[in-house]
Amino acid sequence: MILSIQNVVKTYGNYTAVDHVSFDVPKGRVFGLLGPNGAGKTSLIRMITTITAPDEGAIYLNGEKLNERTPEKIGYMPEERGLYKKMKVGDHLLYLAQLKGLSDAQAKKQIDFWLTKFDIKDWWSKKIEDLSKGMQQKIQFIATIVHQPPLLILDEPFTGLDPINTNLIKDEIRQLNEAGTSIIFSTHRMEQVEEMCDYIVLINHGKNVLYGEVQDIKNQYKQNLFRVEWQGELPSDFGQQFSIVKEENHAATVKLEDESQSNELLRHLIQKGLRITHFEEILPTFDEIFIRTVAGEHHPMHKVS
Amino acid sequence: MSKLSLIVRREYLTRVTKKSFIIGTLLAPLGLLVYMLVIVGLTKYESGSEIKVALLDEAGMVRQLPDDKGVRFLPAGNKTLDQLKTEVREKQIDGVLRIPPLGNFQKKEHTVFYYSDNKLAPEKSSVIERKVAKKIREFKIDSLQLDPKALEMLETDIAIDPEKVTGTGEDDSKYTAGVGLAIGGIMAFIMFFMVTMYGAMVMRSVMEEKTNRIVEVMMSSVRPFDLMLGKIIGAGAVGLTQVVAWVVLSGAVMFIVPFFVGGIDPAQMQAPMTPGEVPIDPEQMEGEAFRFMAEISKQNWPLIIFAFIIFFLGGYFIYSSLFAAIGSAMGDDLGESQSLTLPVMIPIILAFYITAFAGMRNPDSGLMVFASMFPLFSPIVMPFRMAFNPPWWQIALSLVLVVAAAFFFVWLAGRIYRVGILLYGKKVTFREIGKWMFYKG
């Protein structure tokens, strides 16, 4: 476990942004921090990155309570990220790296490594304002990871990125993850969650409403839906024996009372002389889980008098 | 290197290496050079070409006048006025100056006549009036058989020199006010300049970081307080660099100018005198300057310089931290800055007016004592008062207060800054800013 959030509360005036939230982030995995806008994700990230401090509860990084050395162990790429436009690429990266505790020599070595890796070594003395947006995004990414932090927090890392850069950054994230970096990935893009994340926590109205491993959550939310495709004529009594959610030409989505009935369904169709061409269990997408969980709750605004 | 010094270094280096800074720093003294050359050129400029004027001295009071300011006087000899007028018409001479007899010595006014079809330039006319008046005065002294030396003895300059009745210590003279005003004026000017230029620069820079969203990245690396303080110190160092560069370069300009124009006649630097005004006696001017210098050297300079530095730093930190706080509270809308910065500018302007008006009337009045203690005013007011030897405890208290206030304002601004800097897309009121001060970490 790299990060442990324990019963954290954060209020602004009389608005509770984070309300007794607890969860753990496992080491070396990609962890999705999800939630609708205004749910408290940013407040939570700001506490993890020590920009603000919790009013109640505690946060531990590698078993150590957050302290002034914490920023050096975290790489944070905020959703709203900027650069010093008037600075040169090299100076900018050097400055941020040194603020993260690297020595001049270490920083230069790391920057050199990354600029070479991204094939942009000759950018060192280019002014940032002269770079295209896509180029600037590469610089932002390098600035986030230049100090080799064990924990990376990426807030909507792919917004505004073109497909080429998206894939490039995705690859780098994967490589870093394989090399042991733990990653917290905050987004509302659910297809990215399914693609990237091992674990998730879903925050809504400042509360932890769903937490666990991605596969477990999918199983937990599944509705025993199966999709079957066949060749041949469907017997007329099929609809009476199984509840059909959706019927198509030579295909149907069926809802079973119990997942163990899946073999029964197959056996039934085979016995009727149909040739099965496709059979799968339909797991809920995270989009559905997200909407069901968030829409299912109607918390009033939490007010602290 | 500590984070704060990294921030200060960046804030400083990115600014002093900017083209606009380098150009501004070099151009201002160059502008001064051009300005001075133009002024000198203007004073040396002779209005119009030389004119020839026949001097018709009917009573023999003036006889001859020395040539000056492009006027050449020719004796009329035995020619009559009509003959001379013909010469004017024939363009042999430009004009005729007729000085009629004086008549009654008690009459203060005396009219002389100038015949010409061309107008006499104002400068030339005032020169002629002055010269004729001087000659007639000499003529009167001569006629009345007065002793010129005795006449000179009648002139007396009076200077009140206040002396303390109790206690010892340096007393003031009428020059003290001048020196005080000069010190206070310079202080006020530097303060005003630094605060408006570099305080505003701190504000703009804070706003920029906020609007281009770099601040969120920065906040995850450094404490907001360090970022703000680094900015204030960095911008202040830039300001000092510029001021020092200007002082040095302006000094060089002052040194260079005489080589260009071959010396400046101080009498020519004076504004043109109104007719009838008695020219200042150079000897008397020297005396004034000497007494002024004596007053300057009488000041306790080590103390003044020490206090000057403290007040300067104190004032700069107080005002630039307020600007930083305002910058953090502002959104992307530059228009907001107007309404938010005005309250910060008012105390500076007020302090200047208090010094200029109340201070000149009575540097020890209740208002002045208060203003020289109140930290928003004291950086401008107290240096002025220090020339008048206020009680030492007032200086000490004022210094302590300004340092304490500087710490307080930086701390206070830090509390506003850390909240404001991360708040987007909201129009902020002063009431809200007040609330931020009490937010927990």
Image (cartoon, rainbow, N blue to C red):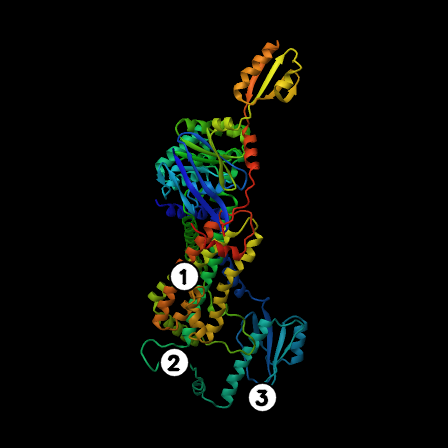
Specify the amino acid type for callout 3.
Answer: Lys
The x, y position of residue A108, in whole percent, is 38, 35
Give yes or no for contact between labels 1 and 2 (Cβ–Cβ under 8 Å): no
Mark 3 neighbour density, 10 Å: few (under 14) some (14–19) many (20 or more): few
Q: Indicate the chain on which mark 2 is placed.
A: B
What whole-number distance in Å separates the C-alpha atoms at marks 1 and 2? 36 Å
Q: Indicate the chain on which mark 1 is placed.
A: B
Q: Is residue A96 visible?
A: yes
Mark 1 neighbour density, 10 Å: few (under 14) some (14–19) many (20 or more): some
Q: Which residue is mark 3?
A: B107
Element marked by disc 2: loop
Question: Which mark is first along the chain, 2 or 1?
Answer: 2
Q: Is residue A167 visible?
A: no
Q: Which residue is mark 2?
A: B162
Q: Which residue is mark 1?
A: B405
Viewer-side residue, B205 vs B279: B205
Specify the amino acid type for callout 1.
Answer: Ala
Element marked by disc 3: loop
What whole-number distance in Å separates the C-alpha atoms at marks 3 and 1? 67 Å
Specify the amino acid type for callout 2.
Answer: Pro
The x, y position of residue A125, in whole percent, is 45, 37
Give yes or no for contact between labels 3 and 1 (Cβ–Cβ under 8 Å): no
Element marked by disc 1: helix
The x, y position of residue B299, in whole percent, is 35, 70
Nearer mark to the viewer, of 2 and 3: 2
Question: Which mark is first along the chain, 3 or 2?
Answer: 3
Q: Indicate the chain on which mark 3 is placed.
A: B
Mark 2 neighbour density, 10 Å: few (under 14) some (14–19) many (20 or more): few
Up the image or down, A138 lies above or below B33; here it is above
Nearer mark to the viewer, of 1 and 2: 1
